[in-house]
Image (spheres, rainbow, N blue to C red):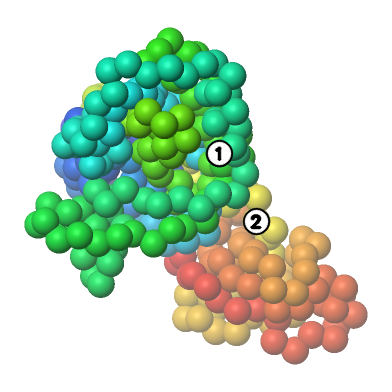
Amino acid sequence: MDLAYLNYVRYEGGLVINKPTGITSHDTLDELRDLLPNISIGHTGTLDPQASGVLFALLGKATKIANFIENWDKEYSAKIKLGVKTDTYDMEGRILEVVDEFQVSESEIKESVGSLIGEISQIPPVYSAIKYKGKKLYEYARAGVEIKPERRKVTIKNLEIVNINLPYVELKINCSKGTYIRSIANDLGEKLGCGAVLAALIRNKVGPYTLEQAVTLEKVAEICNENKISDYIIPISVILKDLPKIVVEEGCEERIKNGMELKRENLASADSCESGETVKVINANGEVLAVGKFLVSSAELEKNKAGKIFQYLRVLI
């Protein structure tokens, strides 16, 4: 690869990665950093090592917008094995119980699955990356220190049974940020009275971005060598397309870069929005310069009754 090419091409935006099984999300990004040296890289939500699928990577100044898209819903395909309990809620953990013979009907499975739809209170696995007093829960678990994770509310928007072939149940799950699919497997096992673990997991979708759009690390290496990586990068303006926009007059970039207050006369146009709504600030070329809160309604702005109109949350230039 022509490394000089990397010095002048702007890698700023999102990249939909198909994370393989067997490595962590952190390791996946490290491999991506090797392919794209000297570029800041982040992501919008980890996947367990044994899971595969969509890992939405953020490149360059796009790492600054992670907070504005972290609440994207996610969709998974999960394969759950009934009749087993482990300390990690998946097949990788220490076996706590095995139920060789259990009797559950299809109607009981459907009823139990249905009871998990909606806003639920979920206990995360003790082997998880949630932090407690500055350390991750799995660090305590590996050290033999018992920490009981606090329950957390998550929303299961849809839970579809794809196939039942006992002892396996396959589900398609659409859920909110922070949902642990391993905990869904464990909860299903508890409701059925036979125990259950997560046997396999694929993340199909993060926000609007799907597995069909995702590229493998091998594909990233190939398109880097061909100098075609920019064809696969999703611009920041597209990632934030659902945010209302305010367009600033020409020459405002330096003002924004220095965090100076935006005034009514600095605006070329503004979408209709309410006071307190999060908006993106763009220039005439559509480049996102900042994200912030509009402090007045569109009606107040039009009547020139506005004082301070904008609060910066993140400057991108």
**Mark 1 to mark 2 CA distance (whole Å):** 31 Å
Q: In the image, what residue occupies the spot 82% across and 77% down?
A: 301
- SS class, disc 1: loop
Horizontally, residue 187 falls left or right of residue 175, namely: left
Q: Position of residue 7 (x, y in %)?
A: 26, 49
Q: Position of residue 142 (x, y in %)?
A: 12, 52
- SS class, disc 2: loop
Q: Quadrant of the N terminus?
A: top left
Residue 54 visible in the displayed image: no
The amino acid sitting under disc 2 is Leu
Q: In the image, what residue occupies the spot 42% across and 37% down?
A: 190
Count of marks, rendered view: 2
Q: Position of residue 288 (x, y in %)?
A: 55, 59
Q: Quadrant of residue 208?
A: top right
Q: In the image, what residue occupies the spot 53% across and 23% down?
A: 109
Q: Which residue is mark 1?
A: 116
Marks 1 and 2, the one that precedes in the sequence: 1
Q: Which residue is mark 2?
A: 243
Horizontally, residue 257 falls left or right of residue 201, namely: right
Residue 299 visible in the displayed image: yes
Whether residue 263 is situated above or below residue 148 in the rendered picture: below
Q: Quadrant of the C terminus?
A: bottom left
